[in-house]
């Protein structure tokens, strides 16, 4: 490590999702500034940020409108507690979220990160059933391969061993269910034309356990941390029908897929779905500040409404709930998303991404895309996964750095969730460069 600051980093900072031994040979990029879709390190090297800084950045780094919104609010108030006090940015944001989301989601609970947004939904669901005299409804169904955060409650409904195995002994017992895997479909069908026959395990699990299941939680259309596993909306239609008939809450974790990522503002709105809870975070402030929101119905809210001595209130608080600065930036973000046909302007970019994806057809694996999210799952013959120790994805990451593209694959899945303001020309550069990197790595292996 040539930089003294990187040496200090190595000695004192514990980075997330990082094996720090790697830093002995490949230290982290010391980012000095960021502009648009690019990161600039201290040496002046430029890197295209094709994963939008962990999927949060919608309008590029250092956007003047967002900067102005933040500065304007900073001149008034940076922070205030949110119990017994309210403020205009939060009021405006809650009303906007309610107006933009599906009919029936009328109440907004603010917190400060995606995991907490999920925790709030789980706790609200559990307490609702207690208030309604059904205390036996204490479990949540979730998809194997699903990811909803890393706090212990959220981790209990995670279906990925890498996140949960070390903590299994302290996690609440939930109901894991085999979910859709369109790339390796056991029915031999295609996601574009199937009738979600893979819903059968979920239907069976919910029917057999409806007395004890409080709710079911899913990532709509795209299971992110599982490797951008994509499945058709008919699965969600069937889920809604089953949950309604059995009296089970439906929790949509749209933390990663909302705010234009799939081409629409919300998956549930685009496909006429009505979740009991809608969890939002990541892009809500375009990556400027931590903020999350859990939307729910008046029916849920009413179960917590009563006299003080009834002890029905929802006891869940965070020091930074509805932070005024974050709410102000979120309001500007939503304005930018919903004005001047911005979401419609994504259609040519989505088409360009699809067209450029065709170049991966000669590589073993699957290129898949939902809106502005795309991924290439790299496999060996007969769809066999590469040996863990080969670290194919990590090798692609290193090749990308040489070419000025910052990719952080999920295992052997190279994925792309660029800022929505990326141009069509930049999309071509992004995917063409990825193609070069992948070919270079596969040639070695």
Image (tube, rainbow, N blue to C red):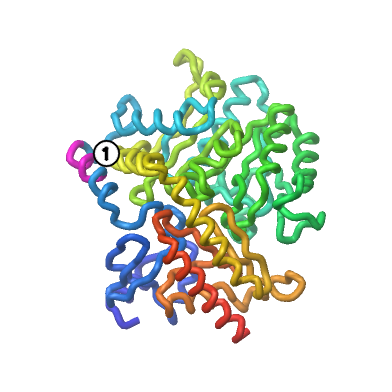
The residue shown at (47%, 75%) is 400
382 up-or-down from 122: above or below = below
- Percent across and percent down for residue 185 are 76, 57
Q: Quadrant of residue 425?
A: bottom left
The residue shown at (64%, 73%) is 388
Visible in this render: residue 291?
no
Residue 72 lies in the magenta stretch: yes
In the displayed orientation, state which residue is furthest to the bottom: 444
Visible in this render: residue 16?
yes
As helix, strand or loop, the secondary structure at mark 1 comes to loop
Q: Quadrant of residue 303?
A: top right
Q: Nearer the viewer, residue 133 or 186?
A: 186
Q: What is the chief secondary structure element of the magenta stretch?
A: helix
317 up-or-down from 358: above or below = above
In the displayed orientation, state which residue is furthest to the left: 75
* Residue range corresponding to the magenta coloring: 70-76
- The quarter of the picture where the N terminus appears is bottom left
Q: Which residue is mark 1?
A: 79
Residue 396 lies in the magenta stretch: no
139 up-or-down from 308: above or below = below
Q: Nearer the viewer, residue 156 or 350?
A: 350
- Percent across and percent down for residue 174 are 68, 43
- The quarter of the picture where the C terminus appears is bottom right
The residue shown at (39%, 55%) is 421
- Percent across and percent down for residue 100 are 46, 33
356 up-or-down from 239: above or below = below
- Percent across and percent down for residue 368 are 62, 60
Pointer 1: residues within 10 angstroms few (<14), some, or many (20+)?
Answer: some
Across the whole image, how many numbered discs are drawn on residues?
1
């Amino acid at each position: 490590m040539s930089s003294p600051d990187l040496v200090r980093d190595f000695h004192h900072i514990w980075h997330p999702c990082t094996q720090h031994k790697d830093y002995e040979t490949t230290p982290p990029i010391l980012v000095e500034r960021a502009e648009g879709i690019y990161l600039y390190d201290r040496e002046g090297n430029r890197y295209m940020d094709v994963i939008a800084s962990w999927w949060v950045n919608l309008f590029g780094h250092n956007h003047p409108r967002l900067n102005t919104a933040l500065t304007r609010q900073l001149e008034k108030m940076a922070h205030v507690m949110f119990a017994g006090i309210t403020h205009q940015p939060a009021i405006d944001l809650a009303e906007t979220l309610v107006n933009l989301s599906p009919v029936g989601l009328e109440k907004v609970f603010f917190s400060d990160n995606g995991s907490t947004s999920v925790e709030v939904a789980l706790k609200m669901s559990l307490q609702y059933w207690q208030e309604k005299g059904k205390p036996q409804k204490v479990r949540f169904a979730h998809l194997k391969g699903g990811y909803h955060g890393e706090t212990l409650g959220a981790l209990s409904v995670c279906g990925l061993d890498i996140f949960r195995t070390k903590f299994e002994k302290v996690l609440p017992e939930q109901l894991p269910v085999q979910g859709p895997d369109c790339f390796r479909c056991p029915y031999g069908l295609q996601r574009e034309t199937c009738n979600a026959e893979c819903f059968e395990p979920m239907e069976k699990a919910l029917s057999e356990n409806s007395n004890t299941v409080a709710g079911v939680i899913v990532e709509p259309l795209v299971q992110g941390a599982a490797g951008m596993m994509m499945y058709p909306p008919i699965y969600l239609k069937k889920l809604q029908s089953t949950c309604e008939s059995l009296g089970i809450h439906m929790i949509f974790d749209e933390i990663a897929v909302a705010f234009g990522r799939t081409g629409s503002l919300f998956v549930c709105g685009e496909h006429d779905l009505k979740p009991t809870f809608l969890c939002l975070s990541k892009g809500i402030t375009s990556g400027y500040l931590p903020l999350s929101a859990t939307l729910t119905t008046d029916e849920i809210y009413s179960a917590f409404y009563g006299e003080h001595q009834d002890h029905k209130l929802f006891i869940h608080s965070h020091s930074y709930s509805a932070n005024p600065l974050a709410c102000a930036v979120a309001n500007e973000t939503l304005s930018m998303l919903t004005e001047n046909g911005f979401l419609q302007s994504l259609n040519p970019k989505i088409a360009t991404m699809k067209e450029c994806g065709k170049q991966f057809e000669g590589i073993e694996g699957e290129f898949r895309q939902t809106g502005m999210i795309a991924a290439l799952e790299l496999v060996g013959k007969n769809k066999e996964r590469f040996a863990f120790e080969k670290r194919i994805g990590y090798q692609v990451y290193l090749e990308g750095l040489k070419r000025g593209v910052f990719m952080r694959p999920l295992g052997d899945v190279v994925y792309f969730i660029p800022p929505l303001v990326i141009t069509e020309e930049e999309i071509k550069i992004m995917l063409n460069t990825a193609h070069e990197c992948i070919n270079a790595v596969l040639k070695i292996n």
